[in-house]
Amino acid sequence: MRKDSSSRHILISFASLALLFTSLCGATAFANEEAPSQDAERVFRFNVSPNGYPPYLITEGDQQSGIMWDVVVLVAKQLDYRVVAEKIPRKRVDQMLMDGYIDGTTRAKEWTDNPEDFVFTDPVVNIEEVLFVPKDSAFQFEVPEDLLSKTLVTHLGYHYPALEPYFESGDIRRFDVSKDRDMFLYVLHGEDLDAAIADRLVGKWILRNEGLQREFTTTSTKLSEYGFRLMLRKEWAPFANAFNRELQALRENGRLDEILSNYR
């Protein structure tokens, strides 16, 4: 009997050791499986478009800069993300965002066909459409009626809601140009062209780089003003909320103004 009891104890001990060994192996395997997900780098795939949108997005080869790029990189670093630039043509952006190929892009809500399909951050900066007028011109603008019989240099394919009825009736004429830079050259050297419509920061950026700052003035009256934001898929809502908190901190500590001053 003592021999049987002893054998039984030995069997129980072996079974206990085997169970302990199995548990340890399982715990180790689970830890190894979990470790990569905890340590994996978090990436934010950000659309900068093939040609950028200076000074908001500037693309020079593989190098990126610009107001929106600098802000996104700074905020992403605070949130422990690395930003990867993707160059997606405008017509494909929304679908590729929905399909998960990219995680975010710059956009104003008002420029989006179905804004309810996406999540938007707070505005990083405002897009202000104004008139750029030659400095020696007597041109005045406060209300659209001041533009009657004028010819405005406009960007090909762009819509200007405040002026569309006047363009359609012919009371105000538009002269379309495909490149932002050329708009200002046409106003300076073209015939019977009174002013150019452009975003204030975009226009000032071009004039600074072309050495034309002294050739133009801008109207204080705006044609439109839109908040320029990040547009994300809906599952990125937590990221958008965190982004907003960090963006507010940048406003309060002056870092956002420092970034903006680099491109004015």
Image (cartoon, helix red, strand yellow):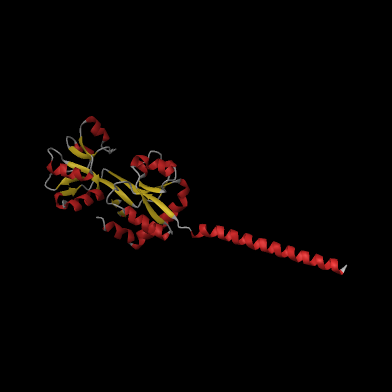
Kindly tell me whether residue 141 is visible in this rendering: no
**Residue 61 % position (x, y):** 29, 52
Q: Image height check: is 249 above or below 125?
A: below
Locate residue 34, reporting x and y percent: 55, 58
Q: How many marks?
A: 0
Residue 163 location (% of width, % of height): 25, 37
Residue 32 located left or right of residue 124: right
Residue at left 29%, top 60%?
A: 258
| Left or right of 58, for residue 120 | right
Q: Is residue 239 left or right of residue 16?
A: left
Q: Quadrant of residue 179?
A: top left
- The answer to whether residue 35 is visible is yes
Q: Residue furthest right?
A: 1
Toward the top, the furthest residue is 169
Q: Quadrant of residue 251?
A: bottom left
Residue occupying image coordinates x 23% and y 30%: 169
| Nearer to us in this view, 87 or 149 | 87
Query: Is residue 101 depicted above or below 255 in this figure?
Result: above
Quadrant for residue 6, please give it: bottom right
- Quadrant of the image for the N terminus? bottom right
Quarter of the image where the C terminus is located = bottom left
Front residue of this view, candidates 172 and 2: 2
